[in-house]
Amino acid sequence: MNKKYLSFDDIKYLTRKLCDQIESSGWKPTIVVGVSRGGLLPAKMISYYWGTPMCTIDVSLRDNSLWYQNFNINLALEIFNNQNILVVDDINDSGATSVCIKNTWSNSLTKSKEKLGEWPSNQIKFGVLLENQASSHQSNYWGIKINKELDPVWYVFPWEISRVEND
């Protein structure tokens, strides 16, 4: 498989494009959530751009396994306080991460005193640096669209360099 190495300058450019797209939409995040690990740097950059607080959630769907923690139910309940939550990751490859987040928050809220009802798409949005058009779930905002069905490139982010060099 071909690999494309992204630089920190690429990350800054893609993050800026994502912010421009959000700004053009008229929607503004009041809380930015970085998906660990790949979404942490872009989420921090976006939180500085918008002057909003940032928190994290941990989700890993690599190698056909699911692991998550830190799905703060209080964060999900913020939607009832008219907060706009932007969930940020580096890439939307298959859509599984955003679906996992939606399902986990929805299930937690249904069990809590609050009832979620329909997913609050006007208050919780997803933003990524790279949006795979072949994904089963599309993000609301992205830095650039790719299509891994047509061009199966493995994108290597700067924070992954040491891991890749050891492969």
Image (spheres, rainbow, N blue to C red):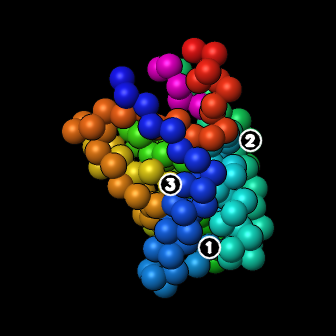
Which residue position is annotated with label 1?
29
On screen, residue 133 above or below 26:
above
Q: Foreground: 98 or 17?
A: 17
Residue type (three-letter) at the residue carrying disc 2: Asn
Q: Residue at 63%, 31% (x, y): give it.
A: 161
Earlier-in-chain disc, 2 versus 3: 2
Q: Residue at 68%, 26% (x, y): give it.
A: 162
Q: Residue at 40%, 51% (x, y): give it.
A: 131
On screen, residue 123 above or below 116:
below
Q: Is residue 162 left or right of residue 17?
A: right
The kind of secondary structure element at disc 1 is loop
Asked if residue 63 lies in the magenta stretch, the reply is yes
Which residue position is annotated with label 3?
129
The secondary structure that dominates the magenta segment is helix
Residue 97, position as x, y percentages in the image: 50, 41
Which residue position is annotated with label 2?
70
Q: Quadrant of residue 160?
A: top right
Q: CA gap, disc 1 to disc 2?
A: 20 Å
Residue 163, position as x, y percentages in the image: 64, 24
Residue type (three-letter) at the residue carrying disc 1: Pro
Q: Foreground: 41 or 141?
A: 41
Residue type (three-letter) at the residue carrying disc 3: Leu
